[in-house]
Image (cartoon, rainbow, N blue to C red):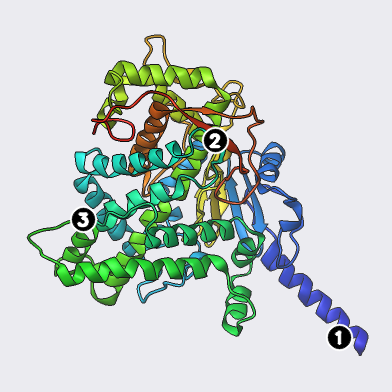
Amino acid sequence: MLHVFFAVTCVLALIWWYKNYTQPKGFPNGPSFALPFIGHGYRLGNSIIKSYHRFRGEYGDIFGLFLGSSRTIILNDFDSIQESGFHEDFMDRPKFLAGLKGTLSDGGEPGVIFSNGKQWSEQRRFALRTLRDFGFGKQKMEEIIDDQVSQLCSILESKQGQPMSVFGVFNVSVLNGLWSITTGQSLSQDDPKIQRINQLFNESDESSASLMFLFAILFPNLEKLLSKTGLWSMKFKTAMEEIGKVCKQPIREHEETFDPNNLRDFIDTHIQEQQNPESGISFHGQDGKLNLQVVTEDLFAAGSSTVSMTLTWAVLFLANYPDIQTKIQNEIKAVTGGNRVPTNSERQNMPFTEATIHEIQRLANIVPNSVPREATKDTYFRGYFIPKGTQIFPNLGEVLMDPKHFSNPSKFDPSRYINESGKFVPSPYVIPFGLGKRRCLGETLARVELFKFFTGLVDHFKMKGPVMHLSARNVHYIHPIDPFHLKFALYRIQTDNLKAFGKF
């Protein structure tokens, strides 16, 4: 009898495994034999990035595998990533992301980054339109960013050229600019509020790069159980909940002082939309209030860590390539006359500066794996059958380092984007913000911030430091760099009528 029970159990287990951990006919090829619960996790080794690169060589530009119990396809070439970005059946975020930040509402996950359906389309359309109307490329936004760059340069100048750790030095400046653009509040660099937000985002970034975050993604039900019992709490969710509390304060203040005839900033405009009876359903009632809070958080998340990390890579590249640094300084001087920082509209006259930023974004590879999406129904994609619920991971890092698009891709070479006429020609394959309808919400703002901070730093300082092998640690999403020390030596003498590094 015991033998019969054992045999039946084994057969049922085999049937369960076959049903849940084998791929259907027509699905992209990939590594064989997924283990129960962990899928192909045992095949990923210490580096997901390197493993995906190896799998691409074995199985092609599109391959399939199981991440935990989730059926997944990894897209590694530009064409498939671009096509998937506009595929109507691939617009949703995976279900495991729902509630990851602890903000799940009746209408689903609020905000923009993790939301789906009508809620996502309404909030994203509103955010892009409002940010465009309030400042992309306009003087007000430039003044806000200029003020933060000025404060940052004053802090660096106070170090008097002594070696200092650059890791995390740009975070507060970038966050503070975003805070001012979003809430209308101007804070000093040492304000406890902005320091607290910076600390919380650092905690969320560290958590998202940890094995425990991967655990929460692979085993969402177990993570929820452990959280409810108090045995374990994911730092990412805790940090995002605290960020939400901080964001509620300026929202309450705006609600109390709201004047429909004097819209001051992004928050005021969202409140006005909430009061509009003809606005979309995601703006109504408590869902509307929650969406305002989470969209505000999303704007910080979309434009803070990635910009500050890119700047960290930027100063390291410049310290290692002093000739390029000098060439940019000469270009700035040629455009501005040497007595102010360039405006965003003048970037079109600075081809080598633009090319250098472009190349830094490519090699820094800040977000190697884009936030995943999910197939909303059974569908076909590039000849493959993709079942409903399949996760889609665009592997941006493979495109950024693809020798088909970049000769000698490991070489830092801004001149690859300069044509025979000396003009900057951006590569369509440099896609740090992703592609398609789900591309980064804060892309336009991030590009302005990068240009302003980058040119402000290069115009004010000569970055000096030890020659380093430019390699990054292997993580899951945000691509950080190991801490290092640089000297920020003053580049030019300032006069009394100039601010920290130029007249605005």
Placement of the C terminus among the 4 image quadrants: top left
Q: Quadrant of residue 452?
A: top left
Amino acid found under the numbered disc labelled 3: Asp
Q: Secondary structure at mark 2?
A: loop
Q: Measured along the vertical axis of the image, is residue 115 above or below residue 446?
A: below
The residue singled out by tag 2 in the image is: 162
At 86% across and 85% down in the image, what residue appears? 5
The residue singled out by tag 3 in the image is: 265
Q: Secondary structure at mark 3?
A: loop
At 60% across and 80% down in the image, what residue appears? 225
Disc 1 to disc 2, C-alpha distance: 74 Å
Along the polypeptide, which appears first: circle 2 or circle 3?
2
**Residue 424: % across, % down:** 38, 20
- Residue ranking furthest to the left: 261
Along the polypeptide, which appears first: circle 3 or circle 1?
1
- Can residue 136 be seen here? The reply is no
At 54% across and 36% down in the image, what residue appears? 364
Q: Secondary structure at mark 1?
A: helix
Is 464 left, or right, of 58 in this rendering?
left
- Residue ranking furthest to the bottom: 1
Disc 2 to disc 3, C-alpha distance: 39 Å
**Residue 345: % across, % down:** 25, 29
Crowding at mark 1 (Cα within 10 Å: few <14, some 14-19, many 20+): few
Name the foreground residue: 62 vs 248.
Answer: 248
Along the polypeptide, which appears first: circle 1 or circle 2?
1
The residue singled out by tag 1 in the image is: 5
Q: Measured along the vertical axis of the image, is residue 210 above or below residue 239?
A: above
Labels 3, 1: front one: 3
